[in-house]
Structures are given as C-alpha cells and as structure tokens.
Amino acid sequence: MIDEATFRKLADAVYRNVLARLDLEDPDEVEAELQAGVVRIRLGHGKAEGGKVFILNHQAPLRELWYAAGDRAWHFALLDGRWRDAHHGGDLQDLLGETISAELGRTVVFELPRP
C-alpha cells in the first residue's frame, strides 16, 4: 500500500487532470470545481429540468478515490498503475468518460495520469 502523502499527490494529479479536461467543455453544459478536496461536476445546469451533480472524492485512510454519478457510486484503488474499481475492476478514466458522455450526449474522453 502506498503511503498517505503519495496517495494525496496522486489524487491531486487526478483532480487537476479531470478539472483541466472538463474546462475544455462548454460551461453551459458542464462545470467542474474543486472545493475542500472534492471535485463537483455539474452537468446540464442550463436545462429546464435542472441538472446533475457528480462527485469525485477521496478516502485517504483507505487510499481510494470515490466517484458518484447519479444513483451509483464506485470506489477505486490504485492497481497496476491505474485507478480500478475495488469491487468490479472497472477503470476510473473509462467510467468518468462513460457517465459524463451519457449526460452530454457526446463522447468525452479522459486520460488520467499514471504514477
């Protein structure tokens, strides 16, 4: 298991990457902000029915990144240099792309940094 300081550096790199990638999108469709160690991704806030908020967070004691999109949530641990779902083996960068793409109606691809 990696030490907490290393984990926090890696988590911060993921956060910066996600924020930078989403800054390339139309701010009327998606906005992302980092506040108090949590990335909030607001999607479709300009729609009449409102919008959705997805959350990317971390749990330092467990060395996991947590992602919540709609009514689903996943926990990711660093395995073989990638953030993998601790229960199902899915990849964080793929899941970010899939869930955000589904909301926006177009493909959004993430390339998360690898340690």
Image: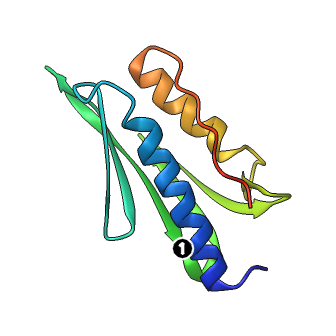
Residue nearer the viewer, 90 or 30: 30
Q: Quadrant of the C terminus?
A: bottom right
Res 48 → quadrant: top left
Check the picture and name the quadrant holding the N terminus: bottom right
Q: Residue under label 1, please give it.
A: 59
* Residue at (36, 37) in percent of width and height: 23
Type of the residue with mark 1: Gln
Q: Residue at x 52, y 25 (%)?
A: 108
- Asked whether 32 or 69 is in front, the reply is 32
Image x and y of residue 20, in percent? 44, 43
Look at the picture and state if 14 lies above or below 3.
Answer: above
- Is residue 26 shown left or right of residue 16? left
Say which of 113 and 93 sits in front: 113
Above or below: residue 64 compared with residue 39: below
Residue beneath the point at 66% across and 51% down = 113
The picture places residue 62, in percent across and down from the top left corner, at 64, 77
Return the x and y of residue 111 as percentages of the image width and height: 64, 39
Residue shown at the point (56%, 65%) measured from the top left: 11
Q: Is residue 101 left or right of residue 84?
A: left
Residue 8: image location, x then y, percent = 56, 75
User: Would you call the spot at circle 1 few (<14 residues within 10 Å), some (14-19), or many (20 or more)?
Assistant: some
Q: How is the image coloured?
A: rainbow
In what element is the residue under mark 1?
Answer: strand
In the image: residue 87, left or right of residue 53: right
Q: Residue furthest left?
A: 48
